[in-house]
Amino acid sequence: QVKQATNQIVMNCADIDIITASYAPEGDEEVHATGFNYQNEDEKVTLSFPSTLQKGTGTLKIDFVGELNDKMKGFYRSKYTTPTGDTRYAAVTQFEATDARRAFPCWDEPAIKATFDISLVVPKDRVALSNMNVIDRKPYPDDENLVEVKFARTPVMSTYLVAFVVGEYDFVEARSLDGVLVRVYTPVGKAEQGKFALEVNELRFSFSLQYRETALLIDPKNSCSSSRQWVALVVGHELAHQWFGNLVTMEWWTHLWLNEGFASWIEYLCVDHCFPEYDIWTQFVSADYTRAQELDALDNSHPIEVSVGHPSEVDEIFDAISYSKGASVIRMLHDYIGDEDFRKGMNLYLTKFQQKNAATEDLWDSLEKASGKPIAAVMNTWTKQMGFPLIYVEAEQQEDDKVLKLVQKKFCASGPYTGEDFPMWMVPISICTSDDPTSAKMQILMDKPELTLVLKDIKPDQWVKLNLGTVGFYRTQYSPDMLESLIPAIKDLSLPPVDRLGLQNDLFSLARAGIISTVEVLKVMEAFVNEPNYTVWSDLSCNLGILSTLLSHTDFYEEIQVFVKDVFSPIGERLGWDPKPGEG
């Protein structure tokens, strides 16, 4: 579409040589471009025409040559070994974020959507794949060793989603519950290993997806549960992009986290739904939540929303802040809104923006409409500024009630926060007690630096814990007596695994930042002698390992080794070295 009369067309193009270009206005003579001016730095080309192109629609034809590169971006070659040991190459694509322009000249921005009609001319003994199903396959007139494969027209979508693959593949297929034919393509001879991914995939999908081999294939006889879980999570993540990314796309890369944070949260939702035995949300806390907190406590972190100018800046934001902190704040938001209103809001959002583009504010707007809560005000404190709060809490018994005093400050890995400004978060706080460790006695939004709360009917011997389910993206520092009262709940396992993990991880980070004494942490760690949960152990052992490294070559090294042995001996004896029937 020519929106206003011009004699130039500017589009994205990188590592491509244009041979000829012409523009034919609807029902008129075609005009040949007379100049191609490449702006390599900006990955653009300007096509100049000898006469003015008038307002209206027309067809732009470009004849060009590109390279099948080895940069792992754009249209590139991928090396593989055949079952007989020969080295061969497949041709594959990776366009996200800004590399479709390496395969064909285009307007390579997420907000410029189009449909794509793709044909590939390929050797006849190779498999050709693209986003859509094959609608025609015929011999190529100029060379009997080639075939022309034509694919159906795609839905309206962004350029970074376009995909082509040419190589040697087997596939397994099945129909999903709602009748969609689902295929998983695998390297030759490995179709059997694609079965598990297919089972997960039957969750439904309609576009084609490309994965790395390690993220999709499972050997039914020799794969451990961690690789099965990894495959289930990756498939769940990419399926989630059908809605978050493909159907509704971010307006610009600043809002990338909408795609990635969402898909990283939904992947766990999918896996938990399909495989409840994986206890995957506890693993989320150790794999994503605590990892994001470690990075976000550093002085050189960045906000979830980063303004992106030049395409070269885009790759930098595909990091743990976009993915893991993104997923963590969405998990917190889901908990704050409640499942029913959250679904309502998401439905509003996806319906309103389907096949279009959206910004972060659009999502807040839909969720606000559905829940009646101040979503934008709350979430801006989590996505527009970096970091997260440390909440200090102390309790005082007043007859039958407990009075809690909460204070929030930015948490810094380098020690107590001493900045000039006072960053503030709107923090959804949930509180549980020993009465019922699995449900909230009180939920409140902390929207100021200090807050005093009254918990009714709590006896002096009852404990109180903040951040039920380790869902809020903050760390908690308890007064010594509150912490003391939680130790028996760790020991007798009345505190759920995800809360035991979070409590221990918070304490360890506070000690590492020099905010509390390491002795406090070790006292609490002793309470984990009866711990049965793998994920809790893996986090605990990681933290003890760091401590043990810090103490090596000091007078305390022998003692910390003895301490570690004491903590690990009971579980070591209980498990033994050999698997027993019925063990997880």
Image: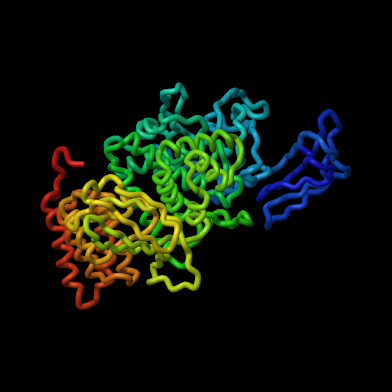
Quadrant where the image shows the N terminus: top right
Residue 408, by quadrant, is bottom left
Q: Quadrant of the C terminus?
A: top left
Q: Residue furthest front?
A: 399
Note whether 12 is above or below 59 in the view shown: below
Identified at 19% across, 69% down, the residue is 560
Q: Position of residue 551 (x, y in %)?
A: 25, 72
Give the residue displayed 38% in from the left and 58% down from the top. Answer: 474
Q: Residue furthest bottom?
A: 555
Task: Judge left or right: residue 231 versus residue 105.
Answer: left
Decide if residue 451 is on the left or right side of residue 255: left
Q: Please state which of residues 86 and 470 is positioned toward the viewer in this rendering.
A: 470
Given residues 410 and 136, the one toward you in this image is 410
The picture quadrant where one finds residue 214 is top left
Q: Residue furthest top?
A: 179
Task: Identify which residue is drawn at 48% across, 52% down.
Answer: 378
- Whether residue 293 is situated above or below residue 90 in the rendered picture: below
Q: Residue at x 23, y 46 (%)?
A: 436
Residue 49, given in percent of the width and then of the height, sits at 84, 44
Depth check: give the residue in front, 206 or 324. Answer: 324
Asked if residue 449 can be seen in this view, the reply is yes
Residue 299 horizontal side relative to residue 490, left or right: right
Percent across and percent down for residue 133 are 55, 27
Is residue 543 positioned above or below 220 on the image? Answer: below
